[in-house]
Image: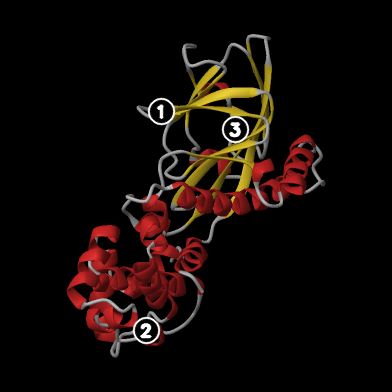
Amino acid sequence: MDALSDVLRVVRLTGGVFLDARFSAPWSLLGRVEAIDFEPFLAAPEDVIGFHYVVSGRLMAQVEDGPSVELRQGDLVLLPRNARHILASALDVKPQLAKDVVAQPPGAGIVSVRYGGGGEETHLVCGYLGSDGASSNPLLAALPKLLTINVADTPAGGWIAQSFAFAAQQLAAPEAGAATIIGKLSELMFVEAVRRYIDSLPPQETGWFAALRDPSIGRALALLHTKPAHAWTADELAGAVAMSRSAFAERFTALIGVPPMRYLTNWRMQIAANRLRDTRQAIGQIAFAVGYESEAAFTRAFRREMGQPPAAWRKQVRGG
């Protein structure tokens, strides 16, 4: 399995929808996805990616202190770090705080909003992708604050766009399953947006995504992700990708930002955290599964990376 698929699997995104909005020009909102938005649907995740899907009309989107982008029907905008952002009919319109316009009482479920000056209408569906433990994941750390993708341009664009549009129109029907459809489609679109972002990077780009495209370093990442319990050394990895140890270590660190063994430790801790959260495996079993010969050595490494020993971390994330 390739490194991107491995990391996406560990991120474990869960999509949901909290707002069906029809805005009429002029209008402008400033905000981000808040805990109250997904409170009716799931426990607050550690990490949130906000998204907005344009059912019809057009608008401008801008992350604070970032570039603006025009969105039209069929566009999906993703905010990988849930940054505060502006959505507006035009950027010269003074923004209102979104939380004041979208007044959502606790437990309200999906909210329908109509707001603006009565001009050209834009229909949006707003939601989130939630994940636990994604903040330390190399994928999210490498993404920009704002990503856009046109649903119709994806390989299965026809049926995906139709499904999005149909589900958005049916949100008012309580038994239609429309929110679930959009949530699952948004998970698919996140993966597609990431793939397209990787393809768009210039040849001289550095970072985790650029490393995936590098024939040698991408192969090394695949090896580390496929066999995390193996007792890898920099020498062995370099030999596996037909590079000298010094050239490999320099290239890996230049692209990823950390040396190979440091990256492996971080990846092992992410796998361990997933198992601690999702299984009843003994800590010793998890330690062995991620490459540690003793529970004591694993506990020291986990405490160093995660701030507390594995037993305490497991108790905390499970709520007792």
Q: Is mark 3 on a helix, strand or loop?
A: loop
Q: Is mark 1 on a helix, strand or loop?
A: loop
- Please report whichever mark, 1 or 2, sits nearer to the chain's N-terminal start: 1
Which residue lies under the disc numbered 1? 67
Q: Which amino acid does label 3 sit on?
A: Pro
Q: Where in the figure is residue 224, as x and y percent of width and height?
A: 37, 76
Is 93 on the left-hand or right-hand side of 298? right
Numbered circle sitting on residue 105: 3
Which residue lies under the disc numbered 2? 229
Is there a contact, CB below 8 Å, between mark 3 and mark 2? no
Marks 1 and 2: which is nearer the front?
A: 1
Is 41 on the left-hand or right-hand side of 69? right
Is there a contact, CB below 8 Å, between mark 3 and mark 1? no
Task: Kindly report the distance in space between the C-alpha atoms of the residues bearing marks 3 and 2.
Answer: 47 Å
Is residue 42 in view from this perspective? no
Is there a contact, CB below 8 Å, between mark 1 and mark 2? no
Q: Where in the figure is residue 15, as x and y percent of width and height?
A: 60, 50
